[in-house]
């Protein structure tokens, strides 16, 4: 059986899953220091700290 190098080099994974949807924090926060996010039956609080970091709390 004769196979070419190209036939033997099959991708192990599709590169598309590496491209994840990205949302800017400014878009979520919309100028606020705190927003509430509902996920299913749970509500989460997303806060921006004085140092500009984000904290997600249940």
Image (cartoon, grey):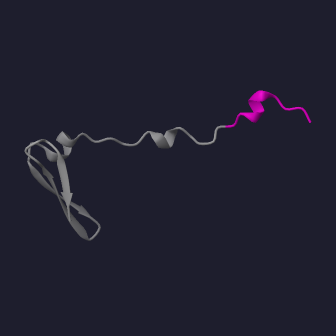
Give the left or right position of residue 25, taking residue 6 as reference: left
Side (left or right) of 41 relative to 18: left
Where residue 33 appears, as percent x and y from the top left, is 8, 48
Dividing the picture into quarters, in which one does residue 8 lie? top right
In screen coordinates, is 46 left or right of 22? left
- Location of the N terminus by quadrant is top right
Judged from this view, the residue extending furthest toward the front is 51
Task: Note whether 24 is above or below 36 in the view shown.
Answer: above
For the record, the magenta segment spans 1-10
Outermost residue, bottom direction? 41
Quarter residue 39 falls in: bottom left
At which x and y percent is residue 42?
Answer: 24, 69
In depth, the one of 53 and 11 nearer the eye is 53
How many marks can you see? 0
Q: Residue furthest right?
A: 1
Residue at position x 77%, y 28% from top?
5
Q: Nearer the viewer, residue 23 or 48?
A: 48
Q: Is residue 32 above or below residue 43?
A: above
Q: Position of residue 44 (x, y in %)?
A: 20, 62
Which residue is located at x 13 percent, y 54 percent?
35
| Magenta part, dominant SS | loop
Residue that appears at 26% across and 71% down: 41
Quadrant placement of the C terminus: bottom left
- The image position of residue 7, as x and y in percent, is 77, 33
Residue depicted at x 11% and y 48%: 49
Q: Is residue 8 magenta?
A: yes
Residue 31 falls within the magenta-colored stretch: no
């Amino acid at each position: 059986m004769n196979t070419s190098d190209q036939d033997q080099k099959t991708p192990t994974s599709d590169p598309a899953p590496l491209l994840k949807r990205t949302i800017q924090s400014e878009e979520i926060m919309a100028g606020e220091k705190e927003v509430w996010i509902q996920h299913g039956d749970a509500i989460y609080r997303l806060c921006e700290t004085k140092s500009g970091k984000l904290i997600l709390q249940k």
